[in-house]
C-alpha cells in the first residue's frame, strides 16, 4: 500500500488535519478527538512522516492507515491542523517540515484552529507560534513552552485565539470538544 498523496486545487472547508508520529503516537489523543470531530460532521485526514501506516503506543497490532504524507500538506485545505502527542511526537520537535506546517497554519486565515495535545505543544513552541500565548501541555514540556515565551496554564485544555492546547490523554475528549466548539458543528 502506498501513501496517498493529497492534491487539491481548492480548499474543502470541512476537513481537519491530524498529524501523528509514524510510531508511538498516543491512542486516545488521536482516536477521541477524531471521533468527536467526525461526529460533528468533519472529515479527518491523518498524516504522518514517511509511512503508509502508523503504530500507536498501546495498540501495536492494529496499524492506522495514513491518508497522506506530511510533505504534501497545504494547510489552507483545512479548517484545523492538529498535532497528536505520544512519545513518538518528539521526532517532530525540531523537524523543519512540522515546524513549517505549524507556522503556516498559524499564519493562515483559512485555518481556524491550530491544536496540539500532550507533548505536541512543544512542536508549536519550537515553531515560535506560542510566544506570548497561553498554553498547556504534558508536564515534561512545561519548561520548553516557557522558554519559548508561552504563558503556561497547567489546565486540561487552553484556548488562546485560534490555538488550542491540551495536557494529555485524560483531556483528549475535552480537547476534541473545544475544537468543535470553535469550529461549530457541521
Image (spheres, grey):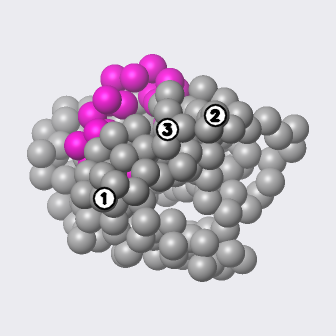
Few, some or many C-alpha atoms within 10 Å of disc 2 (few <14, some 14-19, many ≥20)?
few
> Is residue 26 shown to the viewer in this render?
no
Residue 117 image offset from top left, x and y in percent = 34, 55
Residue at (29, 70) in percent of width and height: 171
Alpha carbon distance from label 1 to label 3? 17 Å
Q: Where is residue 147 in the image (x, y as percent from the top left)?
A: 19, 32
* Residue 87 part of the magenta segment: yes
Q: Earlier in the sequence, mark 2 or mark 1?
A: 2
**Which is closer to the viewer, label 3 or label 2?**
2
Residue located beneath label 3 in the image: 48
Locate residue 15: give its quadrant.
bottom right
Residue 20: give x, y in percent of width and height.
43, 45
User: Foreground residue, 52 or 135?
Assistant: 52
Label 2 SS: loop
**10 Å crowding of disc 1: few (<14), some (14-19), many (20+):** few
Question: Mark 3 to mark 2: distance in Å?
Answer: 13 Å
Tell me the residue that label 2 is attached to: 2
Say the numbered circle drawn on residue 168.
Answer: none
Q: In terms of secondary structure, where does tag 3 sit?
A: strand
The answer to whether residue 170 is left or right of residue 10 is: left
Q: Is residue 82 left or right of residue 8?
A: left
Dominant secondary structure of the residues highlighted in magenta in the image: helix
Q: What stretch is highlighted in magenta?
A: 81-103
Residue 59 badge: 1
At label 3, counting other C-alpha atoms closer than 10 Å, the crowd grade (few under 14, some 14-19, many 20 or more) is many
Residue drawn at x 25%, y 57% is 58
Decide: is 156 above or below 136: below
Question: Which circle, 1 or 3, is nearer the viewer?
Answer: 1
- Does the image show residue 46? yes
Name the one closer to the observer, 16 or 124: 16
Query: What residue appears at the point 49 percent right and 57 percent down from the top-left corner?
Result: 161
Amino acid at each position: 500500500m502506498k501513501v496517498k498523496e493529497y492534491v487539491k486545487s481548492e480548499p474543502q472547508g470541512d476537513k481537519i488535519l491530524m498529524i501523528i508520529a509514524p510510531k508511538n503516537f498516543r491512542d486516545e489523543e488521536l482516536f477521541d478527538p477524531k471521533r468527536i470531530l467526525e461526529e460533528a460532521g468533519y472529515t479527518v485526514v491523518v498524516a504522518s512522516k514517511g509511512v503508509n501506516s502508523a503504530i500507536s503506543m498501546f495498540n501495536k497490532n492494529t496499524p492506522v492507515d495514513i491518508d497522506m504524507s506530511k510533505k504534501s500538506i497545504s494547510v489552507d485545505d483545512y479548517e484545523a491542523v492538529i498535532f497528536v502527542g505520544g512519545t513518538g511526537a518528539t521526532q517532530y520537535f525540531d523537524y523543519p517540515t512540522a515546524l513549517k506546517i505549524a507556522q503556516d497554519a498559524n499564519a493562515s486565515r483559512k485555518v481556524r484552529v491550530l491544536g496540539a495535545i500532550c507533548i505536541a505543544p512543544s512542536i508549536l513552541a519550537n515553531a515560535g507560534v506560542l510566544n506570548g500565548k497561553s498554553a498547556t501541555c504534558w508536564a515534561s514540556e512545561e519548561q520548553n513552552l516557557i522558554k519559548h515565551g508561552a504563558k503556561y496554564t497547567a489546565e486540561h485544555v487552553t484556548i488562546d485565539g485560534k490555538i488550542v492546547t491540551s495536557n494529555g490523554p485524560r483531556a483528549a475528549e475535552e480537547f476534541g470538544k473545544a475544537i468543535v466548539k470553535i469550529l461549530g458543528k457541521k
